[in-house]
Image (tube, rainbow, N blue to C red):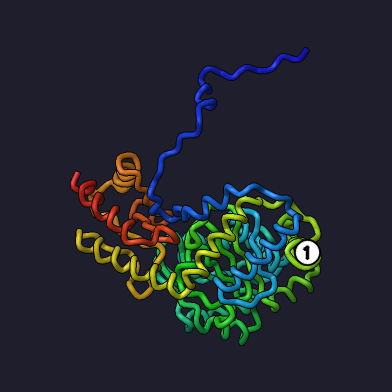
Amino acid sequence: MTQTIAIDNSQKLQLAPLDIPNRLLLGPGPSNAHPAVLEAMNTPPVGHLDPAFLGLMDEIQSLLRYTWQTQNQLTIAVSGTGTAAMEATIANSVEPGDVVLIGVAGYFGNRLVDMAGRYGADVRTITKPWGQVFSLSELRTALETHRPAILALVHAETSTGARQPIDGVGDLCREFGCLLLLDTVTSLGGVPIFLDTWGVDLAYSCSQKGLGCPPGASPFTMSQRAVEKLQQRKTKVANWYLDMNLLGKYWGSDRIYHHTAPINLYYALREALRLLAQEGIENSWQRHQKNVEYLWAGLEDIGLKLHVQQEFRLPTLTTVCIPDGVDGKAIAKILLNDYNIEVGGGLGELAGKVWRVGLMGFNSRTESVDRLLEVLPQVLSK
C-alpha cells in the first residue's frame, strides 16, 4: 500500500485557522472592498451556465457600460486580474507586423511595449519623463511620423500618479485611421471617463481599485471599429483564453461554454458596480476629487512635496516625494507593521523617490485621509 507523506513539522502552521491582519490599504491597489461586496462573495455559487448566473453576467455588462460611459456591445469582465484584461486588448487587436505606437511615461506604458512585442507588433514609442503627460500636438506629430494601426495610452499611470488628457485624441486617431487603446486600470470608477465621447476603441481596467472589489474579474471593452479589425484578422488570436471570438460567444446571446467563471468574484463585481450606480458615477468622481484634495492639503501642511503637477494629478493615486535623508522603505514598513496602513513604494525610475498613496473606491473617505495624516508625522519624526 502506498504510504502518504506526513506534514513536515516546519509546516504545522498550515493547519492553523486563517489569520490575516486587517489593513487600511492606501497603496496603489488593491484597495479595501466595501463590506457589502465582501458579503456578496459569501452567496452560494451556482453553475457558470445557470440561468441565474447568465442574468448576472448581463447585469455586469450593463453596469460596466454605464461606468465607462459607453454603448460598446462587447463589454465584459475577463476572468483574471487587470493584467489579463490588459493582455486581452493587445492579443485581440494586434497582428504580427502591425505598427503599434505606445505612449511611455511610466512603468505600465513599458508593460504595453513588452506585451505588444510578444504578439509580433512593430512597436514604436513616444516618451515623456515619468510624471508628465503628452500634448495633442505631440501625439499628432507621432501619428504623422509612425502611421500606426493602434495608438496605446495609459489614462491613469499607476506608477506616477499622472492623468493623461484624452479629449481630442480619438479624433486624431480617426484622422490617421488607427484605433485608440486606453489603460483605465487606476481611473475607472474614480476619474471621469467618457469612452464613446472620446472615441476610445479598446479599454481595460481591474476590479480592485476604483470599483472597490477584490481582484480577479477585470473589465474589458471593444468598440465596433475594434471588433471589425478583430473579424478581419488574417491570423488567429494567439491567446486562446483571451480570444474575444470565443469569449464573446459566452458573454453574448450564444452562451457557449468557454471556461468555468469565478462565480463568487462575479457576485462581488456585480455588487460593487451596483453600489457605484446607486451612488451615481458623477458623485463618485466628485467624492474622489474632494477627498484627494483634502489629502494633498494635509500632506503639504506637514512639509511633503507631490511629484505630479496639480493639473495632471490623479484623484485616485498620489505620488509623494520622499524627503532627502528619509528611508522610504523603512517608513512604509513602520506604517504597515505598527499601524496596519499600507502605502506603496515607487516603481522603475521612481523607485526610492516616492511613496504611492491610493484613495480608491470604498477607501476614498475622509476617515482614510485622517488616519494617514494622524500617524505619518509621528513616523516621520522618528
Q: Is residue 262 visible?
A: yes
Q: Residue 250: x and y, percent? A: 76, 61
> Residue 354: percent from the left, percent from the top?
34, 56
> Residue at (54%, 25%) from the top-left corner?
15
Q: Residue at x 38, y 69 (%)?
A: 287
Q: Dividing the picture into quarters, in which one does residue 50 lie?
A: bottom right
* Residue 341 placement, left or right of 208: left
What residue lies at 79% left-to-right and 74% top-to-bottom?
232
Q: Which residue is mark 1?
A: 249
Q: Nearer the viewer, residue 230 or 70?
A: 70
- What is the three-letter code of the residue carrying label 1? Lys
Q: Quadrant of the C terminus?
A: top left
Q: Residue furthest top?
A: 1
Q: Nearer the viewer, residue 145 or 20?
A: 20
Q: Is residue 74 left or right of residue 42?
A: right
Give above or below for 146 relative to 246. below
Q: Which image quadrant for residue 6?
A: top right
